[in-house]
Image (cartoon, rainbow, N blue to C red):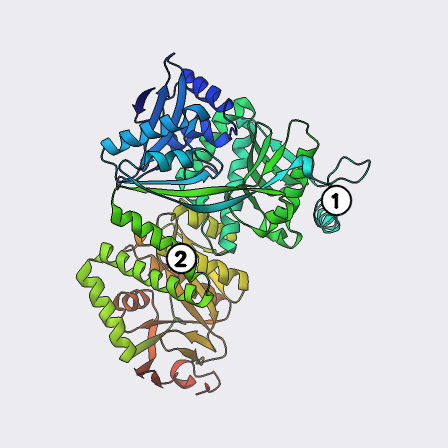
Amino acid sequence: MRLSLLRLIPDDAELGGQWNALIQRLPQPQVFYTYQWALAVHRAYYKTLHALLYLAYDEQNSLCGIAALASDSEGEVSFLCATTGDYCDFLSLPEHKREFVSAVLEQLRRQGVERITLTNLPADSGTIEALERAARNGYGCFARPAYECAQVVLERLERHPGENQPMLPRKKMLRRFLNAMGRETPVRLDHARTWDAIEPILVEFTRAHIARFLLTGRISNMARPERRVFLQELAKLLSPSGSIALTRMMTDRAFAWNYGFQFQGTWFWYQPTFDSDLEKYSPGFCLLAKLIEEASEDPAMKMVDLGLGAEEYKERFANQTRQTMYVTLRTSGVQHIREVLRYHAANVVKVSPRLEAAVRAGAKRLGEFRTNVQTRGAASALAGLLKRCGAALGSKTEVIFFDGGSVSAANTRDARLQPIDLPLLTSAVMQYFDDPPTLNYLVRSTVRLKQGTAQGFALVDAGGDLLHFAWVTEFDGFFLSELNEGVEAPSPDAVMLFDCWTPASVRGNGHYAQAISLVAKRMIEKGEKPWIFSAASNIASVRGIEKAGFQRRYSLVRRRILGWQTISGAPPRPSVVHAQEAPARV
């Protein structure tokens, strides 16, 4: 066996033909193993994943082995398609597996690779045994269970006598929901299989996926441009063979999607999403049910593979599973033992939900501290930690309240104020995909938007970029975390501006002052009196507020000693602010 190493996935039709011909001969060929998949990943992620493509040739110079690997910036090696493919493997016929795997590991060891992590490796693949044998010379190998991938074997589905359609779970509910969504036009499935048909649908699919994740408190992988490029390239590369199917469930408009594949008798449920406005009708469940029904009517289809993830709705349909493994190979004995102990410790912790929550919380705090060390330096991070510890014993916090009733018109500089809604937050996620604090803010804003307890605004420039975010709610009873209690309003028509946020990449341009002055003017036009607050220690915030035209009126001071707190200060009497108002409650 002759081994060749390429440090890229070449755009080579001849290699692609040989590659896919080998895939067809495997016991369980997968779309994730194809040349097109590896090429799409390389085109999208080449900046962060440096390809290591090992090709093995037999005595007749025929391709007999493929290992599409990659190294990251820290030198760790993984499958090239680890973050995109439901299944990843060393690709060779069974009779070549041991020799091929051994040859690749030997090459990696000679190149000085100390850490290899192989995810999504099917447990029924002969690669596991081959790795354990080959790793004895230089690597400590540890394989643990990863995912149970749900599958629907179509021939096992029960059918009513004389009927072709399968008996699916919750049939009455499914019919009721489909009727509700298709009151005027019957619900149907539409499959886009060519790039020309897929391209315009990808835009709506992307935004629906990001919006759906936001509403569940998460950030979609579609927020990252690399992921979007990958799906675009994959669609272009797979559409000529008819292997891709971007499915929409729709009437006169689409309300559920699945970016999936039809390959070697399997229909892959790969990346689905749905319109959250219709969540009460379970559109994702309905789409999957319709897709299984359609697949069962196609003699070429043998299975619907539901892929990674143990979602409950998948279990309703599945009649078998396929397990994947997480395999680590380490040259360091200490690191190898650490991997083993960490896995077993995690299993012990999971026995107690309370203990697991405490461990996760501790790990989160440790991670935050490490991030602070990396971004601010060890000294600054330690000083911040000591300051928080000291504040737990005793602290004094002053909060200043500012009246915006006399704010004048802001200098818009081609920027405008726009109400915050789900499409706007979706655009913001795509704009600030690499800004974790801003993404956390956008998730928090989505929760607030869904609750409907406040109104949000965003400052948008002429090019459509989002520059600043702010929220407004009733003043009276507003809870201030700085004071750890609610506050009373100085007047019945007072409203509070709060949770203002400028993303780090656009700070220092006066967007804060500009945005809050525009929000204040809008509140005044509605007959309301805008207020805003700031910790006295936040000098930048105080300056921005005063620059916007807000007037300092009063402050409240919280003193805290060993868990006890007192609040001093009170809102001004109405005569101080607006003589015509009724006396404020104290």
Q: Residue at x 42, y 60 (%)?
A: 348
The image quadrant of residue 297 is: top right
In this rendering, the label closer to the viewer, 2 or 1: 2
Read off the residue under disc 2: 346
Identified by mark 1, the residue type is Glu
The image quadrant of residue 80 is: top left
Q: Residue at x 62, y 40 (%)?
A: 152
Relative to 316, 546 lies left or right: left
Q: Is residue 493 above or below residue 121?
A: below
Between 194 and 204, the one lying in front of the other is 194
| Residue 388 coordinates in the image, percent (x, y) | 27, 71
Read off the residue under disc 1: 184
Name the residue furthest top. Answer: 60
Relative to 523, 142 lies left or right: left
Q: Tell me the SS state at disc 1.
A: loop
Identified by mark 2, the residue type is Ala
Q: Is residue 273 above or below residue 476?
A: above
Between 106 and 15, the one lying in front of the other is 106
Q: Is residue 292 visible?
A: yes
| Residue 259 coordinates in the image, percent (x, y) | 54, 37
